[in-house]
Image (cartoon, helix red, strand yellow):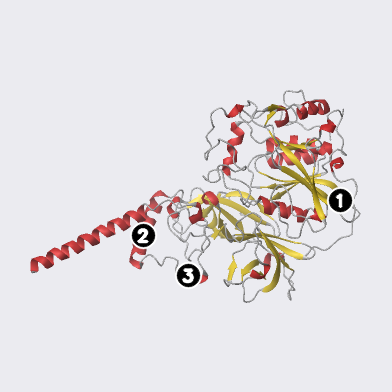
Amino acid sequence: MARKVRTALIAVAASILLLNSICNHLFRHPPSITAQDLLAPPLPLSLQTNPNLAISEHEQLEQDQEEEEVSYKNSRHVTSVRESIPTVSILLPAWEILVILSPETPRPQSDGDVACLFPNNDSSTAVPAGFLSSPYRQTFKCDFPMTLRRRFPFPQPILTSFSPEEKTPAEIKSPAPELLRWNFLVYDSITTDTDVVLFVKGLNHRQGSSRSPTDFACVFGDDVINGVKTAVTSAVQEVIRCQIPKLTAVLPPSKIKISLEVLEQNRVVPSVAHYTPPPRKIATNQPKSQICACTMVYNVAKFLKEWVIYHSAIGVERFILYDNASDDDLDRVVEELIQSGYNVTTAFWIWPKTQEAGFSHCAIRAKDSCEWVTYIDVDEFIYSQSWLSSLNPSRNMLQSLLPKSESSSSLIGQVLIGCYEFGPSNQISNPRNGVIQGYNCRRREENRHKSIVRLDAIDDSLLNVIHHFRLKQGYKGKKLRIEDAAVNHYKYQAWVEFKTKFRRRVSAYVADWTQAVNPASKDRTPGLGYAPVEPHGWAGRFCEVYDNRLRDLIRRWFGFGLSYGYQDGLAES
């Protein structure tokens, strides 16, 4: 009997040891975290007090000790804290962290570097990313350390300045707050004369989708209990419109946080947005620009002059660029264009996969200064066959495509122009003379369209699907014949350039290149696959028709038979 008991005890002990070994193995080598896991919304408030409920206290203690030892041995330049800078941080795709300084915080001053410092004493270099507006705030980007990627909750770092010679391990004495998740966030706001517009991730997940405005309330202030609430009037895609609050106290914009409450869940969406009271109108005789161009850009400095100079020559008076965190020479090129007399402005728009929201934001921002806006990309050029015999460009050319007259019964609020998609045209590097001179072979049929939209005609929901906007009742769109106008879309460029698209798609509702979904979608490149690997014969693909019409027109207008074209030098406007 005693022998059976001993045998049973040994078996139980062996089972416990085996189970413990399996658990340790799982914790040491966890399964890979998917993008959905990484960006999942935070737990409800009722569960956030102890987010590690699935791990026992003893296991948690052992895991923490193990991670501290690994972190101490492997961390890069562990530093002592010279100053802790007030910030809030957001976990973006690809393990990037966006760190936003509080509005009152000046730019960090240090004779060394600025770093993101984490509770396990690991650190990563903080790189300046740009400045948010309303209110004015500096941002940094840093990488989320490998040592912290395998366990929830993900902690926010502190931003600190340090000297390279300081190597003493740092200490963060208070518990670090959890990182905000990018896919559940109020990330920006803009105030009009009549309402407040919020830009929110995580509510409507399909293109064109909307929810009832009665599902939400806008909250002005630090919390739901003490904040001022107003009704939501529209909730489409990432755009939420709500009534202007009646605030009893006069506070600077940096003091008024704004967020969104999901009423049914009794839950407030985390926010990094602030409320700015309606701007005071100043009487001005400054006329509106007849036609403006708005686009979202990322590292397009080498192409920008060609696009601006051409479209300025045919009638675009003002260019508005939403900079999606470029790290090339964009600022320098924009300044050169401004110094040469071109009206170019940039808006820092760091938010990933928000092209539709950015265009809605632009429709509000440009309404006081532009009558019509064309929403085209920097690799797209509008032209008409009727211009082919012109000896010189005219600023009236683009305006000639707009409606000539209006009747009260049928107002044209949007002009739609079909696209021709050009292929690599046997180019293996970026053409030094510009895309118009370098790419001359395209697909035969037109595909999709781009728009020139009258801002007063856009529906209050601001709904758009990149190519066009929903219009107010009483307005309609007009599709031009391809013989009357076309957009040359230099879409499939030399592989050295096209492969950069794998960084991330800009549309909120189009799958990223690396996601193996919707292989037959028009948003996919035929035969490309899901990795930035050059397909066989790429340089000769999508070549069905040689089309030199715009190329030859540009040579006649600007004399660009020169070896460097107008990418490297400015033409006279």
The mark closer to the camera, 2 or 1, is 1
The residue labelled by disc 1 is 288
The residue labelled by disc 2 is 63
Q: Say few, some or many: other residues with alpha carbon within 10 Å of mark 1 (under 14 / 14 to 19 / 20 or more).
A: some
Residue 170 position within the rendered picture, expressed as x and y whole percent measured from the top left: 46, 57
Q: How far apart are marks 2 and 3 (CA)?
A: 21 Å
For residue 206, what is the image quadrant?
bottom right
Q: Relative to the observer, which residue lies in front, 60 or 335? A: 60
Residue 197 position within the rendered picture, expressed as x and y whole percent measured from the top left: 71, 62
Residue 128 position within the rendered picture, expressed as x and y whole percent measured from the top left: 61, 49
Residues at circles 2 and 3 in contact by the CB criterion of under 8 Å: no
Left or right placement of residue 205 versus residue 410 in this view: left
Q: Which of marks 2 and 3 is nearer the N terminus?
A: 3
Q: Say few, some or many: other residues with alpha carbon within 10 Å of mark 3 (under 14 / 14 to 19 / 20 or more).
A: few
Q: Which of marks 2 and 1 is nearer the N terminus?
A: 2
Does residue 117 show up?
no
The residue labelled by disc 3 is 47
Left or right placement of residue 282 versus residue 509 in this view: right
Decide: is 257 above or below 452: below
